[in-house]
Amino acid sequence: AQKVTQAQTEISVVEKEDVTLDCVYETRDTTYYLFWYKQPPSGELVFLIRRNSFDEQNEISGRYSWNFQKSTSSFNFTITASQVVDSAVYFCALSLWGNRDDKIIFGKGTRLHILP
Amino acid sequence: GAVVSQHPSWVICKSGTSVKIECRSLDFQATTMFWYRQFPKQSLMLMATSNEGSKATYEQGVEKDKFLINHASLTLSTLTVTSAHPEDSSFYICSAALRDRPLDTQYFGPGTRLTVL
């Protein structure tokens, strides 16, 4: 069975601090996708990144970076120099490749508070 | 990028009434659409998977007679909450997957907040 664990329920940091959101996934499949989504107070999900299981390269996009390690089944997300606008709930998610009926499995989310 | 809309964005109804929520893919054809429910401060839970022209596949524990899903075209899926009760109050989110592509990307709608009095 597939599972996504976000152990951090809620995190508060002061603006400009760096923060890392943890994500650990479980799957027996060798081909899968991993995602991060941001959900601001408005509720609309904002897609941040998709990574397939064959690509373990870390990625950086502005202040955001992602560390994918298959050895530990982790896909962690780091925000550097955090800003108040980063306050949101962040979801890590997993989907399997190829089967059109497959679904995205979401973690429980991490609520991030950036304090001014 | 691909855009998915939902209508209405919020709705308040009396207990016992039925509510229909529309999910449209605006600039692409979506073979598959998904319906999620999100309770306050909780994660998204998949309710059902909807394929155009066929019956929806419901997740375990989701009542198909209560949550009617129709996916009549490649751009529209509807979720009808029949005889709504206060415990059905939730944030309902749909997503759409691009036609003829592996299920690697879902485009999410903005959500519909349902409040049942």
Image: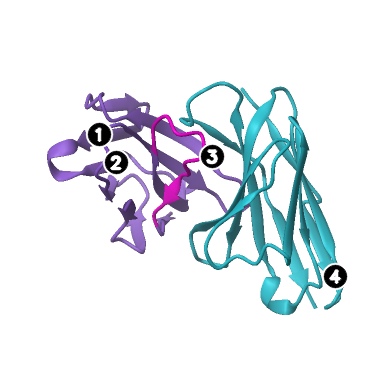
Chain colours: A purple, B cyan
Which chain letter goes with mark 1? A
User: Mark number for residue A78?
Assistant: 2
Is there a contact, CB below 8 Å, between mark 4 and mark 3? no
Task: Looking at the picture, tell me which residue is in the foreground, B54 or B111.
Answer: B54
| Residue type at tag 3 | Val
For the residues carrying marks 4 and 3, which lies nearer the camera in this image?
A: 4
Give how far across and how far down residue A34 sits, in percent. Answer: 35, 37
Q: Is residue A52 left or right of residue B64?
A: left
Residue at the disc numbered 4:
B13
Which chain letter goes with mark 4? B
2 or 3: tag closer to the N-terminus: 3
User: Mark number for residue B76?
Assistant: none
For the residues carrying marks 4 and 2, which lies nearer the camera in this image?
A: 4
Identify the secondary structure beneath mark 3. strand
| Residue type at tag 4 | Cys
Residues at marks 3 and 1 on the same chain: yes
Q: How many neighbours does mark 2 have within 10 angstroms: few (below 14), some (14-19), or many (20 or more)?
A: some
User: Mark number for residue A46?
Assistant: 3
| Residue type at tag 2 | Thr
Tell me how far mark 4 sits from mark 2, CA to CA: 41 Å
Range drawn in magenta = A96-107
| Residue type at tag 1 | Thr
Residue positioned 27% across, 46% down in the render: A27
Residue at the disc numbered 1:
A30
Q: Is residue B35 left or right of residue A31?
A: right
Identify the secondary structure beneath mark 1. loop
Q: Quadrant of the C terminus of chain A?
A: bottom left
